[in-house]
Image (cartoon, helix red, strand yellow):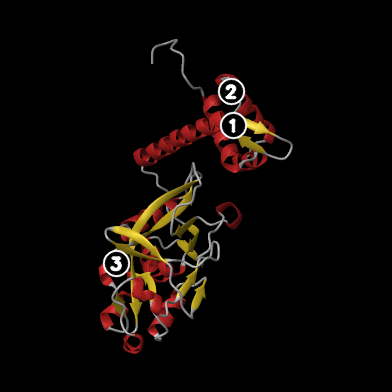
């Protein structure tokens, strides 16, 4: 740089941007101050400096809370991305990854926990023996701020810009029944014939509604309402157990019943209307300084599970 050339940012300005991003992420000057080990007044001054420099208001302040203005939201998104790029550049160039250690808290839905993630956790710990893993197995969404989870896996990405979403796989759905049930009730040959069968129901944990079955018909995905005398809530694996016991037909993920289909304890029904998939997505908060254990687990999951 030539002598006398004006720097676009000085150290104070970069520090103000970091404190602004913290306040935006935490929706609180006080929480940002605690996280950065400074005073709330220092955070407020930093934001004021930015607002004066930019000539816009970044936050709407009340006695109880702060929230980003439209201009503040745009600035936050750009600054967060820029800071993340700088941190990643330093990590790659310096090679100082930091040895993964500590406790990793993960929230997982029931089927994905039992058939995808739990079986590979010993391999993850063999690579990173100083990382302890705590799993929360439930089909309900978790709040990262309140529940202190590092990551979660869910069936879809929420409309939340504070979370990073990485698709692990698109899991195929399949309708199954036991040979005993099909001997007693017959095998449905068309979608309409499902109405005459005992179709095991599953209630969505998010809203308690019955989950419709989705089938492929004439090249499009079709939601099909079904009915039956058995219902499950919370644990989708309960429907699989009922199907094995001859209670009726059930739609679930192919990876859950793959061994049953190989052994013959369950039979696929209406395969010509199969091929529908649902995603499984790994979620974790945007962070300026992602811990080495979280980064290691994200990389491990993408390596092992991404389809």
Q: Is residue 300 visible?
A: no
Residue drawn 71% across and 35% down?
62
Q: Which residue is mark 2?
A: 56
Q: Is residue 183 visible?
A: yes
Q: Residues within 10 Å of mark 3 (few under 14, many from 20)?
A: some
Q: In x, y percent, where is residue 280? A: 39, 59
- Work out whether mark 1 precedes mark 2 in sequence or the reverse, and give the earlier one: 2
- Work out whether mark 2 precedes mark 3 in sequence or the reverse, and give the earlier one: 2
Task: Report the disc number at residue 274.
Answer: 3
Q: In x, y percent, where is residue 138? A: 51, 67
Task: Report the disc number at residue 250.
Answer: none
Task: Name the image quarter holding residue 148.
Answer: bottom right
Task: Report the disc number at residue 69.
Answer: 1
Tag 2 secondary structure: loop
Q: Nearer the viewer, mark 1 or mark 3?
A: 3
- Could you give the CA–CA distance between mark 1 and mark 3, rounded to whole angstroms? 47 Å
- Left or right: residue 73 compared with residue 126: right
Q: Is residue 226 above or below residue 299?
A: below
């Amino acid at each position: 740089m030539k002598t006398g050339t004006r720097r676009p940012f000085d150290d104070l300005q970069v520090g103000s941007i970091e404190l602004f991003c913290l306040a935006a992420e935490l929706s609180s000057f006080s929480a940002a101050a605690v996280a950065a080990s400074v005073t709330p007044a220092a955070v407020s001054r930093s934001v004021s400096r930015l607002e004066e420099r930019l000539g816009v208001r970044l936050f709407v302040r009340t006695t109880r809370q702060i929230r980003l203005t439209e201009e503040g939201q745009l600035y936050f998104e750009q600054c967060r991305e820029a800071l993340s790029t700088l941190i990643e550049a330093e990590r790659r160039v310096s090679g100082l990854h930091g040895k993964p250690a500590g406790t990793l808290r993960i929230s997982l839905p029931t089927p994905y926990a039992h058939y995808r993630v739990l079986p590979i956790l010993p391999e993850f710990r063999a690579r990173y023996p100083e990382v302890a893993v705590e799993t929360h197995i439930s089909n309900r969404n978790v709040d990262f701020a309140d529940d202190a989870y590092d990551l979660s896996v869910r069936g879809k990405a929420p409309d939340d810009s504070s979370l990073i979403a990485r698709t692990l796989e698109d899991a195929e759905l399949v309708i199954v029944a036991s040979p005993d049930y099909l001997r007693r009730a017959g095998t449905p040959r068309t979608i309409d014939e499902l109405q005459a069968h005992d179709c095991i129901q599953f209630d969505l944990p998010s809203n308690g509604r019955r989950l419709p079955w989705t089938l492929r018909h004439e090249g499009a995905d079709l939601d099909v309402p079904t009915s039956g005398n058995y219902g499950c809530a919370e644990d989708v694996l309960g429907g699989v157990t009922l199907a094995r016991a001859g209670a009726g037909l059930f739609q679930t993920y192919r990876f859950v019943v793959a061994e049953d289909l190989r052994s013959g304890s369950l039979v696929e029904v209406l395969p010509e209307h199969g091929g529908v998939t649902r995603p499984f997505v790994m979620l974790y908060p945007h962070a300026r300084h992602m811990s080495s254990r979280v980064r290691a687990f994200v990389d491990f999951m993408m390596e092992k599970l991404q389809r």
